[in-house]
Image: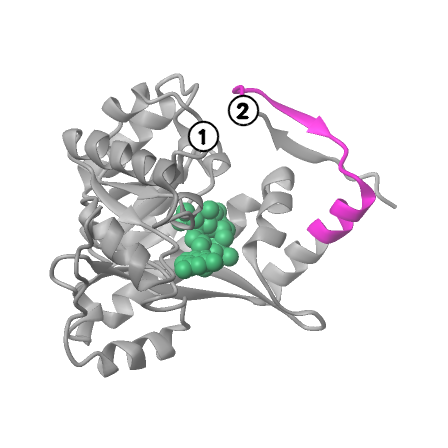
C-alpha cells in the first residue's frame, strides 16, 4: 500500500527520494485530504510595541480542524508536510489566506494598518517560485506589500549559496518585510545576517521562558538585542507569559512583545473583538535588569 515515495529536500541543494515510514505516509495523505477538504484555518496572535503599547501586527498560525481528533497544532503536521513536499501547496494556502484576511481588514481603523506575519518553511524556498507566488498573492488580494512580513528560521540562510538571500532581496525590493524566527536556537553562524535584508529578529521562546531568574538566558537575549540593533533589526520577543518577563525584556531593549500574557492566537472575528475591547494601549514598566 505504501509504495509512494516522498520528495525529500535535503539541506544541501539536491533533492532525493526517500521512503517514509508507513505511519508518516498515512498521515501525509490525511494532510493532503485535509487541504482538499478545507480543514485548515488560521489564527492570529497580536504583537505589541513595547514602548507605545500599541498593536504592531499579528502572526498568522495554522491549525487543523480534524473531523475526529479536533484541533491539531502545527507542531504535529508541519514536519510531515515538509518531508513530503506538501508544505508547498500548504504554504501557498497559508499565504493566500493570511493576505486575503489582512486585506479584508482594510476598513478596520486598527487592523487595517497592521502587518501580518506569515511563517514560511525553508523548504518552500526550494520550490523555485516563492517570490513570484507571493507577489501574485499580493496583487490578487490587494494587500500592500509593506503589510506583509515573511518569517523564516535561520536554517534558510545558513549554508545558503546566496540563492535564498537573493530571493529575500527581491521581496525586499517589492516592499515585503522579513523576520528571522526562533533566533538563537538553530545555528551559531551569524554571517548571513549582514547579507540578508532582514527587518525583525525574533528571540525564541526558550530564552524568554527562563526569565527573569536565569542570568544566562538574560545575557543571551542582551547579546541578541545588541547584535540585532547594530544591524538595524527590530527585536521581537515571543512567548511572553508573565509581567516579570515582559518588563525584563523591555529593560533589555526588545521592541515588540508577543505572548499569551497579551493575547493567545485568535480566529479573525475574535481578534477583531479583542482589538475593539482594548480601551487604551498597554503599559509595561521596565524592570531593573
Ligand atoms: P513560531 O513561528 O515560532 O510561532 C510561535 C509559537 O509559539 C506558536 O505556536 C504560538 O502559539 C506559540 N506561543 C506564542 N506565545 C506563547 C506563549 O506565551 N506561551 C507559549 N507556550 N506558546 C506561545 P504554534 O501556533 O503551535 O506554532 C508552532 C510552530 O509551527 C510555529 O512556531 C511555526 O514554526 C510553525 N507554524 C505555525 N504556523 C505555520 C504556517 O502557517 N506555516 C509554517 N511553515 N509553519 C507554521
Ligand atoms: Mg513564527
Ligand atoms: Mg518563533
Ligand atoms: Mg517555532
Find the residue positioned furthest to the left. Answer: 52
Residue 139 on the magenta segment: no
Please determine whether, in this image, residue 66 is positioned above or below residue 22. below
| Residue at image coords 42%, 50% | 209
Please determine whether, in this image, residue 268 is positioned above or below residue 139. below
Residue 191 coordinates in the image, percent (x, y): 30, 19
Neighbour tally class for label 2: few under 14, some 14-19, many 20 plus, Cα within 10 Å: some
Q: Which quadrant of the view contains residue 181? A: top left
Residue assigned mark 1: 155
Q: Is residue 4 left or right of residue 285?
A: right
| Residue at image coords 32%, 53% | 117
* Marked residue nearer the N-terminal end (1 or 2): 2
Residue 223 coordinates in the image, percent (x, y): 26, 31
Residue interval drawn in magenta: 12-28
Residue assigned mark 2: 11
| Residue at image coords 24%, 44% | 235
Q: Is residue 171 left or right of residue 59?
A: left
Q: Which quadrant of the view contains residue 32? A: bottom right
Q: In front here: 268 or 191?
A: 191
Amino acid at each position: 500500500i505504501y509504495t509512494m515515495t516522498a520528495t525529500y529536500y535535503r539541506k544541501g541543494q539536491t533533492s532525493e527520494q526517500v521512503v517514509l515510514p508507513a505511519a508518516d505516509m498515512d498521515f501525509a495523505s490525511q494532510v493532503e485530504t485535509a487541504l482538499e477538504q478545507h480543514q485548515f484555518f488560521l489564527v492570529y496572535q497580536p504583537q505589541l510595541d513595547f514602548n507605545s503599547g500599541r498593536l504592531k501586527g499579528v502572526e498568522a498560525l495554522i491549525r487543523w480542524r480534524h473531523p475526529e481528533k479536533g484541533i491539531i497544532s502545527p507542531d504535529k503536521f508541519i514536519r510531515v508536510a515538509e518531508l513530503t513536499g506538501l508544505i508547498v501547496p500548504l504554504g501557498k494556502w497559508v499565504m493566500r489566506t493570511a493576505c486575503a484576511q489582512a486585506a479584508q481588514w482594510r476598513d478596520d481603523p486598527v487592523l487595517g494598518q497592521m502587518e501580518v506575519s506569515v511563517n514560511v518553511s525553508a523548504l518552500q524556498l526550494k520550490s523555485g517560485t516563492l517570490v513570484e507566488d507571493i507577489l501574485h498573492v499580493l496583487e490578487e488580494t490587494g494587500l500592500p506589500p509593506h503589510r506583509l512580513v515573511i518569517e523564516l528560521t535561520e536554517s534558510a540562510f545558513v549554508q545558503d549559496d546566496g540563492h535564498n538571500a537573493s530571493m529575500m532581496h527581491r521581496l525586499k525590493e517589492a516592499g515585503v518585510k522579513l523576520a528571522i524566527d526562533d533566533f538563537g536556537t538553530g545555528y551559531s553562524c551569524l554571517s548571513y545576517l549582514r547579507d540578508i535584508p532582514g527587518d525583525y529578529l525574533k528571540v525564541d521562546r526558550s530564552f524568554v521562558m527562563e526569565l527573569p531568574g536565569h542570568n544566562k538566558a538574560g545575557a543571551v537575549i542582551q547579546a541578541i538585542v545588541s547584535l540585532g540593533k547594530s544591524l538595524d533589526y527590530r527585536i521581537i520577543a515571543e512567548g511572553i507569559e508573565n509581567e516579570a518577563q515582559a518588563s525584563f525584556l523591555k529593560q533589555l531593549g526588545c521592541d515588540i512583545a508577543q505572548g499569551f500574557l497579551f493575547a493567545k492566537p485568535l480566529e479573525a472575528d475574535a481578534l477583531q473583538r479583542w482589538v475593539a475591547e482594548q480601551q487604551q494601549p498597554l503599559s509595561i514598566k521596565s524592570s531593573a535588569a
